[in-house]
Amino acid sequence: MYGDQKKVELADVIRRFGKRFVAQETLSPDQIKALYHILQCRTSALGGHEEVCTCCGEVRYSYNSCGDRHCPKCQGTKQALWVEQLIQTTLPVKHYHLVFTVPHCLNKICLWNRKMFYTLLFRAVWSTLRSFGYTHYGVESGAIAMLHTWGQNLWLHPHVHCLVPAVGYSLKGKWKQIGKTSRFLYPVQELSETFRGKFLDSLKRHLKKQHQYTPSFDSHIQDAFPKDWVVFSEASMAKADHVIQYLGQYTHRVAIANSRILSVNDTKVTFIAKDYREKTIPKPVILDGVEFLRRFCLHILPKGFIKVRRFGIYNATTKRNLELEFGNETIETVKPRKKETACETLKRLTGIDVLVCPVCKTGTMILVRELPRIRSPGNHLPSLLNACLQQ
């Protein structure tokens, strides 16, 4: 449908509208740094290497990636590696996929202090799941939780995806399967109400402790109480690796992938978004270029903030060489693979052999020389970003 469109990337949007955007908005150091990295990703500024084919003599120049977690070019390999590592360290049992969301009326509090808001969100999610594990099954349960902050139209939409195993550790020190008699792990309505109470209570307490509980914030919190808080729950999936492969689609996503951007002109950006009010039909959305960048920057996380977290029996301090005993059967965790080079790992996970010549398809690309990165004078990020935008 859109295959004839010229390929456009997020970096192109930043180059086109970045100067106006930086002049109009007050950006945090984390936002400036992310935009700067995206502009430089896979360009000569970061250096690279020159390769030549052993068969046909084809010469190829490859430039280094920026590695920023908000860059749409740098997440594919990271996602594949993360999925593989998670499969090796995940209990080989059924898992449930749950999604906890908060109403949009709390977005202003989120924007005031995102790190605080997201931290309390993680705590409320795990506190809810943990309490339900004890009250419904009498076990210490676990979860792997990951934060997403966006909707399809790039508006702020904080929600947490959770991977919950159908097993827990009982108070008697025994492994116990849970959720055996139901398609769903916990009653969704009860889960939603408990989550709402825990999150809003912790939010009020924190704001009062920081002496920031203003009438405006109180109004937003009061508006949130009567809202329908949605906790999405899927029926259990048969195998751990299947649900991890499915959930792996969410872990290293950024607010928008390059494949969703259709076109850019002097004033507008057109991109694809699923319309959930009409059976998730993909539709084009047109935004002013500066507004597009403003929405994208809403989803740049604070420095050092961990967006994928493990709780309970999946916490690194409690999960060590686990073995599960179900009856007389013992199931061990997956053994780690032998050491591989980066190229071998990429080929095994994606099927792409980066060493094969793209022209003759038979020769091997060998390194001829490394290309040094371009040294920029000083390290003042706003100046460096402006310098990139002037180019």
Image (cartoon, rainbow, N blue to C red):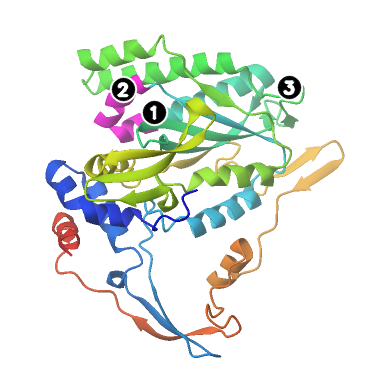
Look at the numbered discs 1 and 2 and tell me whether their residues touch, using CB distance below 8 Å.
yes
Residue that mark 3 sits on: 182
- Callout 2 environment at 10 Å: few (<14), some (14 to 19), or many (20+)? some
Judged by its main secondary structure, the magenta piece is helix
Amino acid under label 2?
His
Q: Nearer the viewer, mark 3 or mark 2?
A: 3
Look at the numbered discs 3 and 2 and tell me whether their residues touch, using CB distance below 8 Å.
no
User: Is 93 in front, or is 210?
Assistant: 93
Task: State which quarter of the image contains the C terminus.
Answer: bottom left
In space, the residues marked 3 and 2 are separated at their CA atoms by 37 Å
- Callout 1 environment at 10 Å: few (<14), some (14 to 19), or many (20+)? some
Whether residue 319 appears in this view of the structure is no
Q: What element carries label 2?
A: helix
* Residue that appears at 75% across and 41% down: 324
Point out which mark residue 313 bears.
none
**Seen in the image, is 1 located left or right of residue 183?**
left
The span picked out in magenta is: 104-119
Whether residue 217 appears in this view of the structure is yes
Residue 294 vertical placement versus 342 (above, below): above
User: Is 109 in front, or is 91?
Assistant: 109
Amino acid under label 1?
Leu
Amino acid under label 3?
Ser
Residue 295 vertical placement versus 72 (above, below): above
Residue that mark 2 sits on: 206
Residue 124 screen position, x and y as percent = 45, 25
Q: Is mark 1 on a helix, strand or loop?
A: helix
Residue that mark 1 sits on: 120
Earlier-in-chain disc, 1 versus 2: 1
